[in-house]
Amino acid sequence: MRILCSLMMLLLVGTAMCTEPPVPKGVAPQIGLASAVQKDGKVMIEVLELREVMRIKMPNGGDVFIEERHWLVLTTGTLGDDIRAYRPDGKPATARDVLNALQKPRGTAYFLGYDKEKPVQPDQFYLSLFKEESIALAFDRPELAPPTIQP
């Protein structure tokens, strides 16, 4: 009887250890700096990305690139039209949620998609990592899509 119980326990533990958790769908979030203001009844959001290299135009023509961290505007848009916001529970964030979370520029996770016909959707796995009062942004910028090689 003990052997049978031991074998059953080993079988259950072995099965539990071999079961792989579900893999998140879609893209992983990126980190940027975002702020929001209300203008003419609409919530305007600006998202900046951290860049490692800066381009300097030379007076005699040409460009020089130097290593220097700096913020660069990634996108500016209207909540609901251009940019979507999500709460950690996966539900859409309200205008009030966005204004409260982004009244001052702060680090924010964003999901960047490249196809406006198929908007990027954050996976609940990633959203569940965020604090209760925070929000995550999602937007699509086809012009930033990585180049593809044509066969």
Image (cartoon, rainbow, N blue to C red):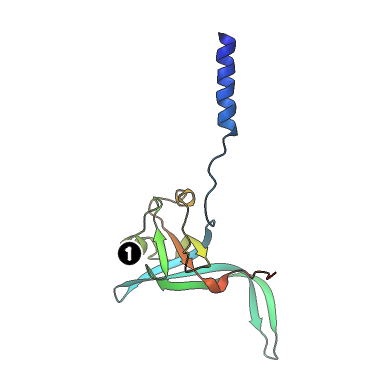
User: For numbered disc 1, what is the local secondary structure?
Assistant: helix
* Residue furthest bottom as drawn: 60
Q: Position of residue 90 (x, y in %)?
A: 40, 52
Residue sitting at the far top: 1
The N terminus - image quarter: top right
- The image quadrant of residue 57 is bottom right
Residue found 46% across the figure and 58% down from its top: 121
**What's under tag 1, amino acid-wise?**
Ala
Residue sitting farthest toward the front: 151
Seen from the viewer's position, the closer of residues 138 and 104 is 138
- In which image quadrant can residue 82 be found? bottom left
- Is 11 placed left or right of 91 in the picture? right
Q: Position of residue 15 (x, y in %)?
A: 57, 29
Q: Badge 1 is on which residue?
A: 95
Measured as percent of width and height from the top left, residue 122 is found at 47, 56
User: Is 8 placed above or below 46 here?
Assistant: above
The percent position of residue 108, horizontal first and vertical second, equals: 47, 60
